[in-house]
Amino acid sequence: MEDLNPRWRKSSHSGGNGGECVEVADFAGVVAVRDSKDPDGPKLVVGREQFATLMAALKH
């Protein structure tokens, strides 16, 4: 994933205290999610449609 140089952005629901933050990157037909405290750690990578389904489920 490092070779693709995704542009990460912090969730608008993340607090300003640097705690429980999630970052997402939309690139190459997929969406990646990572913990902002561990940018080199594991990432969840899913298709855009699956990500939209996940977000809809979390909102309800």
Image: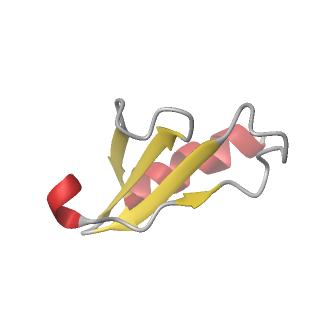
Say which of 6 and 48 sits in front.
6
Figure colour scheme: secondary structure
Q: Nearer the viewer, residue 52 or 36?
A: 36
**Residue 15, quarter of the rendered image:** top right
For the point 47% across and 40% down, which residue is it?
34
- Residue 36 location, x and y as percent? 56, 41
Left-right relation of 41 to 51: left
Identify which residue is drawn at 55% across, 43% down.
54
Q: Residue furthest right?
A: 16
Coordinates of residue 58 in the picture (x, y in percent) = 69, 39
User: Viewed as shown, does residue 20 lie left or right of 6?
Assistant: right
Please determine whether, in this image, residue 51 is positioned above or below residue 37.
below
Specify the quadrant that holds the C terminus. Answer: top right
Q: Quadrant of residue 26?
A: bottom left
Q: Please identify the residue farthest to the left as the structure is shown.
A: 3
10 displayed left or right of 33: right
Numbered circles on residues, count: 0
* 52 is higher (above) or lower (below) than 15: below
The residue shown at (63%, 56%) is: 10
Q: Position of residue 17 (x, y in %)?
A: 84, 40
Residue ID at (34%, 47%): 46
